[in-house]
Amino acid sequence: MNIFTKLLLAFVIFLSGCGKSPQKVNDEKIEEYQTYYDIVNKTQKFKDSSENFNIALEMSQIPDGTYRYAIVVDDAKIAMYDVVMIAVENNTPYDDADKMMPSLGIFEDSCSLIPGQVNTSQGYAKGLAMSGECSEDGVDLEILVQYKNAKRTKETREFFSYHLNTEGYEYKKAEKE
């Protein structure tokens, strides 16, 4: 079973007690995932850092010869509610992707980052991480970090672009060509 199939199966089991049918919920979540994915692919301007939080990346080789990478957002400087994150590898169009890209806050319950507060039972995390795998020591990542203010009346999206390998990461580009 590939990761996409496992993910869908897990959500069918998890959401079986919800009011909506599991298939309808899954379809809605897949559509939401695709919407965020397409937003990243259509974005033209990227940043290398944020004034509102820290973002860090790391890659390591795993025993089977592939590479695993992690993207961590932490040290929030402002209240960040209902955080959604997604990363797209190598600017791959949605229809050409042969795997699920790393995401957070789409298929799972929402999490928030509040300066100086950690309470996982209420959804306040110290930091958030997502990870992915690739076959080569090097990947270009375009990342969306979206969050809302405390009243949930304003939504902020920040976009980042990095080249990552086992040596580290660097800001890739300010704009797509």
Image: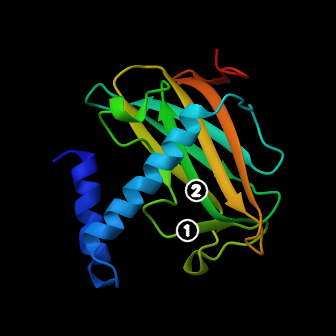
Residue extending farthest left = 1
In the rendered view, would you say 45 is above or below 39? above
Instruction: Name the residue tied to disc 1.
Output: 110
Q: Toward which corner of the image does residue 13 lie, by quadrant?
A: bottom left
- Which residue is drawn at the image coordinates 59% and 74% (left, top)? 123
Residue 107 vs residue 77, the one in the foreground: 107
In terms of secondary structure, where does tag 1 sit? loop
Residue 50 position within the rendered picture, expressed as x and y whole percent measured from the top left: 78, 42
Report x, y in % for residue 46. Answer: 71, 31
Assign a secondary structure to mark 2. strand
Q: Which residue is mark 2?
A: 84
Residue at the location (58% across, 56% down)? 84
Q: How many marks?
A: 2
**Upstream in the sequence, badge 2 or badge 1?**
2
Quadrant of the drawing holding the C terminus: top right
Q: Are marks 2 and 1 in contact (CB under 8 Å)?
A: yes
State the residue at coordinates (53%, 47%).
36
